[in-house]
Image (cartoon, helix red, strand yellow):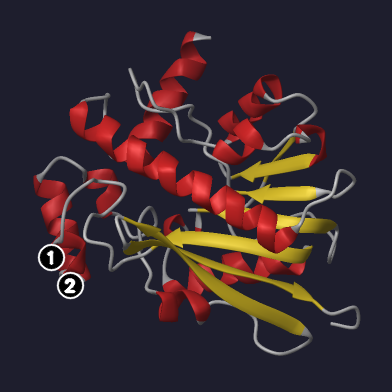
Amino acid sequence: MQEIMKEDTVDAIKYDGFKKANIISEIKAHFVLHARKKIYKTFLECMNPQRQNKILDAGITPAKGIVGAKTLTNNYFEQVYPYTDKITATSIEASGKNLEKLYKGLTFVLTEPYNTPFKDKEYDIVFCNAVVEHTGTREQQKAFIHEYCRVGKKFFFTTPNRWFPVEPHSALPFVHWLPAKIFRKILVLLGKSSLADEKILNLLTMKEFRNLFPIGGGVCIKQKRIRTLGITSNLIIYGEWSDDG
């Protein structure tokens, strides 16, 4: 159990940018949770999931949250979706197996970043929340999205908006608008070196996000925006394949 806790802590630092909870991380978590509630509502409206639908949650977070956190935002989908026995969750982190203990009937599959063991359209719906920005270069992000679009009849992806004034992982204002090299140097100077790695954090605008998705071939794609304090904080792209696509 102690070993699992260490893994959880390492994973939390890597993606949340905080070693332990403080007032800034709690404020950040409050706004993240607010956005995720809106995202979940939008998911229900756009995907209209049914009891029998098989859902693939692409790229869950192994950690429950940072040490001492009161507001838990990780894997919000599993927290609220009523049919966890229909969810298959994936991660490149083996500690994601812990989710099988937390959510009744959930199945965890350890995957490679841009390659999965699933068949074409094996799942009714692919859900992927705030993962794409953690999958590397633009080409790698594109490979990740294409792979998960391949295995779902419908798909629903979200990512933070790069043009939102506060960078949601580090909770730093405006610095992520600077050229990438300068932004990453600032992260290192402020002790958030894990987020300075392009493989861990590479933010997107709506145009960049949309360009990562398949074009033609029987796929229909739409987009939506989630607003926080009146400003677009999260980007959503969703779609489905036609029967002959």
Q: From the top left corner, tell me how far across and down residue 119 is, in percent.
A: 85, 61
Secondary structure under the numbered disc 1 in the rendered image: helix
Residue 160 seen in this snapshot: yes
Q: Is residue 87 left or right of residue 173?
A: right
Q: Relative to 60, is 66 above or below?
A: above
Circle 2 packing at 10 Å, graded few (<14), some (14-19), many (20+), is few
**Residue 71 occupies which quadrant of the picture?**
top left
Image marks 2 and 1: residues in contact by CB distance under 8 Å: yes
Amino acid type, label 1: Ile
Residue 18 seen in this snapshot: no
Secondary structure under the numbered disc 2 in the rendered image: loop
Question: In the depicted view, which residue is nearer to us: 35 or 141?
Answer: 35
The residue carrying mark 2 is 179
Q: Residue furthest bottom?
A: 216
Q: Which residue shows up at 28% across the image and 45% down it?
A: 194
Question: In the depicted view, which residue is nearer to us: 40 or 197?
Answer: 40
Q: Report the disc number at residue 182.
A: 1
Amino acid type, label 2: Pro
Circle 1 packing at 10 Å, graded few (<14), some (14-19), many (20+), is few
Q: From the top left corner, tell me how far across and down residue 93 is, in percent.
A: 55, 38
